[in-house]
Image: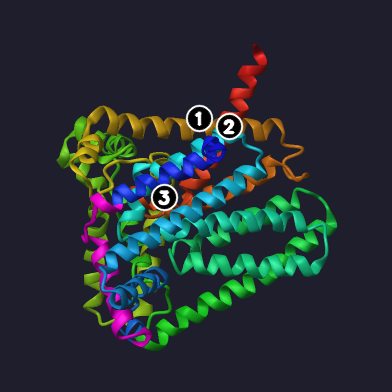
């Protein structure tokens, strides 16, 4: 009985009981992108990898491979693959909670705040929705936490033996490869993050540390780009496109072309209103004016240009390069406007919580709760404000402790590396159009930062009495 009084064990137990209820009462909806994931899973399960490459470039391979695995298990046990997929994804979420707890221990977060963090990660409408739907974000959660643990250990190893540094570089590189083959955005995040990582190492002004950092990066980058380019080469051999996924270039051109349209005062205000969500924008400006900033509007720009170029019978790689070149040309037309709208896009990263992600059918009771305006809007706004304020506090703390952040095995060092990763993620994604579910991979890092800041604030309030 004493174990059940432990708040952390209770947090895990409540999460698991809630998931059991959801498995019994909810249903996965196969719509939008999930149709594509299901079809790719079927292709891999029935026809194998050669067909996957021949019909490509397709989506990133790791998640469709997981769906194919669920389909094969479903066939063996006579169960719906969707049920098996949901169970696997809930196990991934459980593993994410365990890794989160490991990080909270490193940061010396007390048991009550640790339990609250674990519990919220287990019952968050947005995060749990991702575990119940057929979208690939769920597989990145433990990968990112694992990466942060390895990067932290890597940084600490730069004053130690070279052999350990090389082993950590190999392990970290393999996890980054797996992340990139899960979500292609990490092909951009990786160089941005490690550029900032190297700059940070230079600030230590420690010759041995900097040399070991360079050794680490050489091994990391050689392994990472060798494996990623091998996958891209397989695509080139079978379908003529030296790329990871079929979405990257179109996803770049569409938002770029939209941002370079004439920017009136009203259009800029609608862009700002769209940051907290489409509903906010429509309530202030109406559906017609807000449609310009909808995800589908960017796709219209992209598909129109792709259809225009495809009539010239360009090979896939040349067409992709042409779209990249056109995107650069548009940016050069007005780089200030482009940079301003990129920054506005990045602000969406704070509005991650949502009860209306979709693609899951809930019980009548949960549906009423999730659509109840005070709960729906209050939770979204509340978590956005908490996240934003946590980053403001942490930024101030970094500035106050700036001489020691990079020097010691401390909580601030780990959090600094997390912030570098989050910044790299947000700046990379802001080039494209951001949907709510695109934010989910970094939510565990958000919650860890919030827990740290809450502990700091609570102790400061307590000490003042």
Q: Is residue 70 left or right of residue 415?
A: left
Instruction: Spot the residue most to the top.
Output: 465
At 26% from the left edge and 43% from the top edge, which residue is drawn? 356
Dominant secondary-structure state across the stretch colored magenta: helix
Tell me whether the residue at label 2 lies in contact with that at label 1, contact meaning CB atoms closer than 8 angstroms.
yes
Q: How many marks?
A: 3
Residue 440, numbered circle: 3
Residue 435 visible in the displayed image: no
Dot 1 falls on a residue whose secondary structure is: helix
Asked whether residue 250 is drawn in magenta, I would say: no
User: Which quadrant holds the C terminus?
Assistant: top right
As helix, strand or loop, the secondary structure at mark 2 comes to: helix
Left or right of 205? Residue 258 is left
Q: Is residue 34 found inside the magenta-colored segment of the image?
A: yes
Q: Which residues are magenta?
A: 23-50
Is 176 rendered above or below residue 447?
A: below
Residue 132 appears in the picture as rendered: yes
Residue 369: x and y, percent? 24, 35
| Circle nearer the N terminus (3, 2) | 3
- Residue 343: horizontal and vertical position, in percent? 43, 43
Q: What residue is shown at x 27% (from left), y 55% (from top)? A: 298
Give the CA separation, mark 3 to mark 2: 20 Å
Measuring 27% from the left and 37% from the top, which residue is drawn there?
270
Q: Which residue is mark 1?
A: 389
Q: Nearer the viewer, residue 123 or 135?
A: 123
Q: Residues within 10 Å of mark 1 (few under 14, many from 20)?
A: some
- The residue that label 2 is drawn on is 453
């Amino acid at each position: 009985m004493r174990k059940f009084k432990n708040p952390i064990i209770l947090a895990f137990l409540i999460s698991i009981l809630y998931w059991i209820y959801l498995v019994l009462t909810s249903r996965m909806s196969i719509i939008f992108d999930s149709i594509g994931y299901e079809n790719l899973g079927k292709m891999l399960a029935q026809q194998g990898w050669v067909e996957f490459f021949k019909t490509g470039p397709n989506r990133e391979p790791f998640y469709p491979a997981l769906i194919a695995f669920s389909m094969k298990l479903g066939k063996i046990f006579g169960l719906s693959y969707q049920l098996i997929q949901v169970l696997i994804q809930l196990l991934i979420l459980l593993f994410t909670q365990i890794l989160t707890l490991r990080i909270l221990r490193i940061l010396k977060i007390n048991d009550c705040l640790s339990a609250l963090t674990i519990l919220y990660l287990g019952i968050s409408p947005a995060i749990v929705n991702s575990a119940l739907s057929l979208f690939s974000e769920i597989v990145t959660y433990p990968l990112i936490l694992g990466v942060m643990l390895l990067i932290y250990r890597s940084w600490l190893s730069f004053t130690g033996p070279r052999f350990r540094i090389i082993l950590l570089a190999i392990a970290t590189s393999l996890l980054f490869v797996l992340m990139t083959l899960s979500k292609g955005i990490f092909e951009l995040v990786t160089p941005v993050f490690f550029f900032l990582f190297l700059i940070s190492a230079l600030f230590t002004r420690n010759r041995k540390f900097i040399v070991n950092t360079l050794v680490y990066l050489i091994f990391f980058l050689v392994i990472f780009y060798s494996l990623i380019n091998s996958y891209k080469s397989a695509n080139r051999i079978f379908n003529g496109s030296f790329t990871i996924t079929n979405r990257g270039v179109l996803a770049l051109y569409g938002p770029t072309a939209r941002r370079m349209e004439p920017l009136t005062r009203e259009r800029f205000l609608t862009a700002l209103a769209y940051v907290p969500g489409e509903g906010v924008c429509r309530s202030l400006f109406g559906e017609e004016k807000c449609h310009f900033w909808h995800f589908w509007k960017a796709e219209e720009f992209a598909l129109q240009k792709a259809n225009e170029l495809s009539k010239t019978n360009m090979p896939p790689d040349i067409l992709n390069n042409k779209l990249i070149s056109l995107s650069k040309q548009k940016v050069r037309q007005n780089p200030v406007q482009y940079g301003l709208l990129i920054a506005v896009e990045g602000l969406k990263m704070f509005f991650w919580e949502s009860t209306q992600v979709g693609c899951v059918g809930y019980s009548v009771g949960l549906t009423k709760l999730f659509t109840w305006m005070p709960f729906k809007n209050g939770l979204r706004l509340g978590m956005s404000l908490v996240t934003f304020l946590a980053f403001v506090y942490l930024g101030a703390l970094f500035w106050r402790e700036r001489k020691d952040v990079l020097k010691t095995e401390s909580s601030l060092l780990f959090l600094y590396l997390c912030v570098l990763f989050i910044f790299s993620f947000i700046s990379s994604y802001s080039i494209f159009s951001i949907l709510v579910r695109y934010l989910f991979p970094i939510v565990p890092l958000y919650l860890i930062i919030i827990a740290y800041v809450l502990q700091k604030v609570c102790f400061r309030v307590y000490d003042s009495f």
